[in-house]
Amino acid sequence: MLTPLEIEALELSLLVGVTSIIAALPFALACAWLLARRDFWGKSLFDGIIHLPLVLPPVAVGFALLVLFGRNGVIGAFLYQTFGIVFAFNWKGAALASGVMAFPLMVRAMRLSLEAVDQRLEAAARSLGSSPWRAFLTVTLPLTVPGILTGAILGFARSVGEFGATITFVSNIPGQTRTLPVALYTLTQIPGSDLAAWRLAGLSVALALAALIGSEMLARRMGHRLRGLD
């Protein structure tokens, strides 16, 4: 039976994870398509920038987000004054931090899936009168679905496990930004909370494993269907 603290942290983690992936998915697919199908000046630099969150300390990413999206930040001030949107120190900021950290994994999975699709199939569709967009939507996109699902679920697993960028950008606020990893960190700072910390750690592991296994199963199932094996 889950305690109120565990339920709160789990629900917030799921909200942050799902929101971050839904928001990041179209941008990740667009970046993956650019990297897989287009050659342009600065492509290597663009690729490097996308993958920076994988190699930078998460705290550095969180600090950059605070500078950019804080209420007085370069982008945050505009969003607040124009639309009344605030990212810092609330769950939306946690979703933004998680999405940024998960973004490279999503792009990589989708890019590999796009590169595996034979471009001659699109060319054949265009030769039959389809526009480039229609050929992409009706030919390439369905064949890329396993990679998209894999990227989305891997991104979700990364999102719900995000700690460094989240706590730096949106702090540790109960009910707002205290996701599973942040709640676990909080418990490790309280003497005598070892059992509660172990329970949260086990819950985090179970959630991550479920996401990874689900990713593998969905990718295989969709791959079989696309090949007409089911």
Image (cartoon, rainbow, N blue to C red):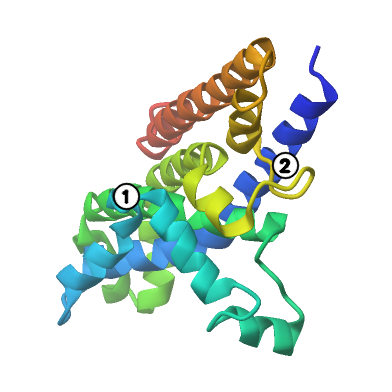
Any part of residue 210 in sight: yes
Front residue (pair 35, 208):
208
At horizontal 43% and vertical 47% (from top left) the residue drawn is: 145
Label number found at residue 125: none
At horizontal 63% and vertical 19% (from top left) the residue drawn is: 197
| Residue on which disc 1 sits | 54
Q: Amino acid at mark 1?
A: Leu
Residue 181's quadrant in the figure?
Answer: top right
Residue 159: image location, x then y, percent:
53, 44
Q: Amino acid at mark 2?
A: Leu
Residue 225: image location, x then y, percent:
44, 34
- Asked whether, in this view, residue 82 is left or right of residue 78, the answer is right
Front residue (pair 109, 172):
172
Any part of residue 22 in sight: no
Query: SS class of the residue under badge 1?
Result: helix
Front residue (pair 27, 46):
46
Quick one: quadrant of the N terminus?
A: top right
Vertical arrangement, residue 77 with respect to residue 214, above or below: below
| Residue on which disc 2 sits | 12
Residue 66: image location, x then y, percent:
54, 67
Front residue (pair 30, 97):
97
Residue 97: image location, x then y, percent:
53, 56
Quick one: quadrant of the C terminus?
A: top left
